[in-house]
Amino acid sequence: MKVRASLRSLKDKPGAKVVRRRGKTYVINEANPRWKARQG
């Protein structure tokens, strides 16, 4: 799966984690919950 550029920029933020659930790619950030993203 190609990873969208917006997810790449979010994964570099402090506290970010890339998680794959049920075939979808998520970026979740416990340090700043505004920085969430989903692909797929």
Image (cartoon, helix red, strand yellow):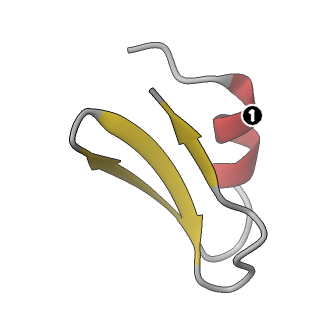
Residue nearest the observer in this picture, 23 or 30: 23
**Residue bearing mark 1:** 6
Residue 40 drawn above or below residue 18? above
Q: Quadrant of the C terminus?
A: top left
Q: Amino acid at mark 1?
A: Ser
Residue at x-position 59% and y-position 83%: 30
Residue 34 position, x and y percent, is 78, 70
Measured along the vertical axis of the image, is residue 21 above or below residue 28? above
Instruction: Indicate left or right for 35 with 17 as reference.
Output: right
Residue at 53 percent across and 23 percent down: it is 3
Q: Position of residue 12 (x, y in %)?
A: 69, 54
Residue that appears at 75% across and 34% down: 6
What is the x, y in percent for residue 21? 26, 48
Q: How many marks can you see? A: 1
- Please tell me whether mark 1 sits on a helix, a strand or a loop: helix
> Residue 32's spot in the image, x, y percent?
75, 80
Q: Is residue 19 left or right of residue 29?
A: left
Q: Give the side of residue 19 with respect to residue 5, left or right.
A: left
Name the residue rendered at 65%, 39% in the picture.
7
Figure check: 8 above or below 37: above
State which quarter of the image contains the N terminus: top left
Furthest residue to the bottom?
31
Which of 22 and 14 lies nearest the eye of the viewer? Answer: 22
Residue extending farthest top: 2
Badge 1, how many Cα within 10 Å: few under 14, some, many 20+? few
Quadrant in which residue 27 is drawn: bottom right
